[in-house]
Image (cartoon, rainbow, N blue to C red):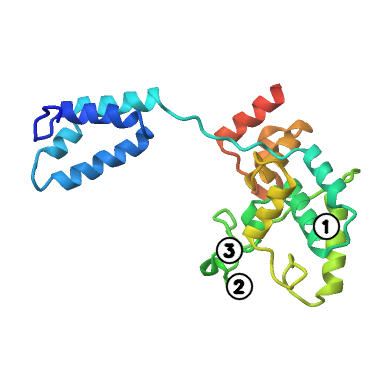
């Protein structure tokens, strides 16, 4: 139709790259090119060298720089969000509400990952026989979560003790720490659904731990100290560290 030669050349693959990058992400175009290479290689043995030619590689690199998409950062949970949550459901006598409050505040101030607070949805990951460990725990000492009581509505120690009282009265003798009113561990999907109903859409499960780290930094905890706080529970990546420093500058 466009009078292009039947056999692919570096020019045609380069033009194809530019055309497709106008419609989809350049990273997807790279996958398209690999697929084209696999399909055409039985008929055109030199397609692999054409795909790796300088012209095609430079074209794809230029499209990635020209049409790159910015990463979507989730907002860190803030103390004001915790205050709003406690004001909304803090007076509820429902065991599930008490559980949710305890999980959110414990995860925030204890720098917990979401997976450490909930039960997996995937049944293959629901293992009672495996003890969670990490590579730095050479003597199987376990992980210690340090949470300090504070004078506020969202005091994590008070809310945790309140949950324990409710749990022990409903399910005495059960070994699980976190239990819903139906005796089942809170699953990830259930926690996320409550989380999304309680907070704005730009806050996700990862915002819990990130917000706790940010709150510690704003309170004056040294950045290097917050990275190893609570027996090494938090290992901030470079991008999170930059986010914290930027927030502090604001």
Q: Are marks 1 and 3 in contact (CB under 8 Å)?
A: no
Q: Residue 152's image quarter?
A: top right
For the C terminus, the quadrant is: top right
First-in-chain label (1 vs 3): 3
Mark 3: secondary structure: loop
> In the orientation shown, which residue stands out farthest toward the front?
1
Q: Picture coordinates of residue 46 (x, y %)? A: 10, 38
Kind of element beneath mark 1: helix
Please name whichever residue, 202 or 151, is drawn nearer the observer in this view of the structure.
Answer: 202
**Side of 56 where 5 appears, left or right:** left
- Residue 55 is situated, as x and y percent measured from the top left of the image, at 21, 25
| Mark 2 lies on residue | 128
Most extreme residue toward the bottom, as rendered? 173
First-in-chain label (2 vs 1): 2
Residue behind mark 3: 121
Q: Quadrant of residue 103?
A: bottom right
Distance (Cα) linking label 1 and label 3: 24 Å
Q: Is residue 240 left or right of residue 153?
A: left
Residue at x-position 51% and y-position 33%: 71
Instruction: Kindly report which numbered mark, 1 or 3, lies closer to the viewer in this rendering.
Output: 3
């Amino acid at each position: 139709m466009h009078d292009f030669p039947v056999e692919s050349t570096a020019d045609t693959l380069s033009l194809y790259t530019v055309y497709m990058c106008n419609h989809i992400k350049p990273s997807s175009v790279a996958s398209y090119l690999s697929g084209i290479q696999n399909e055409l290689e039985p008929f055109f043995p030199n397609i692999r060298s054409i795909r790796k030619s300088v012209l095609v590689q430079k074209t794809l690199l230029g499209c990635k720089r020209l049409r790159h998409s910015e990463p979507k950062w989730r907002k860190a949970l803030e103390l004001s969000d915790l205050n709003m949550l406690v004001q909304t459901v803090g007076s509820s006598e429902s065991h599930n509400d008490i559980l949710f409050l305890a999980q959110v505040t414990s995860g925030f101030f204890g720098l917990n990952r979401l997976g450490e607070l909930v039960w997996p949805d995937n049944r293959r990951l629901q293992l009672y026989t495996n003890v969670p460990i990490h590579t730095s725990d050479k003597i199987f000492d376990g992980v210690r979560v340090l949470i300090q009581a504070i004078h506020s509505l969202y005091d994590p120690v008070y809310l945790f003790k309140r949950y324990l009282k409710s749990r022990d009265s409903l399910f005495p003798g059960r070994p699980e720490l976190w239990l819903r009113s139906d005796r089942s561990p809170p699953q990830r999907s259930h926690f996320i659904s409550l989380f999304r109903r309680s907070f704005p859409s730009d806050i996700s499960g990862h915002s819990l731990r990130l917000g706790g780290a940010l709150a510690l930094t704003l309170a004056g905890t040294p950045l290097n100290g917050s990275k190893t706080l609570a027996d090494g529970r938090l290992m901030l990546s470079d991008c999170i560290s930059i986010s914290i420093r930027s927030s502090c500058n604001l």
